[in-house]
Image (tube, grey):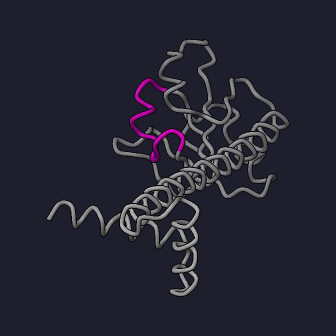
Amino acid sequence: MCCDPDVRHNDYIRALQRQRMEVTTIWPPPHGRLSPDTDILICEYFPEMSDLIPWTPGEADGALIIILPQNGRYDDAKLVACAPQAVLQRPFSEALIASTVKVAWSQHRYEKRLIDRVTKLDHNVRSLRDVERAKMIIMLEKNIGPDDAYRHLRETAMREQISVSLLASSIVQTSEQLRTS
């Protein structure tokens, strides 16, 4: 928790501890980056905040909850640049803290699943691209059609006991190395 201790600060900490959270308080904000080894970072908004967040927005190791200033003065663009999973505004209740933490953690896990899914899809697209390029290479070398080229690729992969995409990638890399040398 990186926030300015106010009158109810200890109440907020106890509310988090009742949620079975281990709470560490840091104030004032460090001059360097905040610690990345946290599941949930609850941090008071300040203009330089995006520079201190220990991860790149979209690649968060933990959920980020930003406490907005009670006076309502904050820069929307800087808040968005931090990519928080939730926000709180003082004064807040124990129930609001609990529900905000649950929503932020759920949102963080959802974002992680989406990032994992996009990464897998990117890998699949690269693999398909390599398979198509390997088919073209085999078609030109053996003077055969696309179905026969894929069949040859698949049979070779089975014989070598490797995946078709790995074999295709190897064929493409070897072909590129031969062209450049």
The quadrant the N terminus occupies is top right
Q: Quadrant of the C terminus?
A: bottom left
- 56 left or right of 121? left
Q: Quadrant location of residue 150? A: bottom right
Q: Residue furthest right?
A: 95
Return the residue nearer the eye: 39 or 83. Answer: 83
Magenta region, main secondary structure: loop
Q: In this view of the protein, which residue sits in the foreground, 132 or 13? A: 132
Q: Is residue 60 magenta?
A: no
Residue depicted at x 77% and y 40%: 103
Image coordinates of residue 167 in percent, x first then y, are: 47, 73
Q: Is residue 67 positioned above or below 58 on the image?
A: above
Find the magenta span and give its range. Answer: 46-58
* Residue reaching furthest to the front: 143
Q: Is residue 107 above or below residue 18?
A: above
Q: Is residue 71 left or right of residue 129?
A: right
Q: Nearer the viewer, residue 128 or 2?
A: 128
Is residue 32 rendered to the left or right of residue 116?
Answer: left
Q: Residue 119: x percent and y percent?
A: 56, 52
Residue 54 x, y percent position in the rendering = 45, 47
Residue 83 picture quarter = top right
Position of residue 88 relative to residue 176, above or below, is: above
Residue 67, quarter of the rendered image: top right
Coordinates of residue 79 in the picture (x, y in percent): 53, 24
4 or 149, which is in the foreground?
A: 149
Q: Residue at x 45, y 38 (%)?
A: 28
Residue beneath the point at 75% across and 45% down: 106
Instruction: Give the number of callouts.
Output: 0
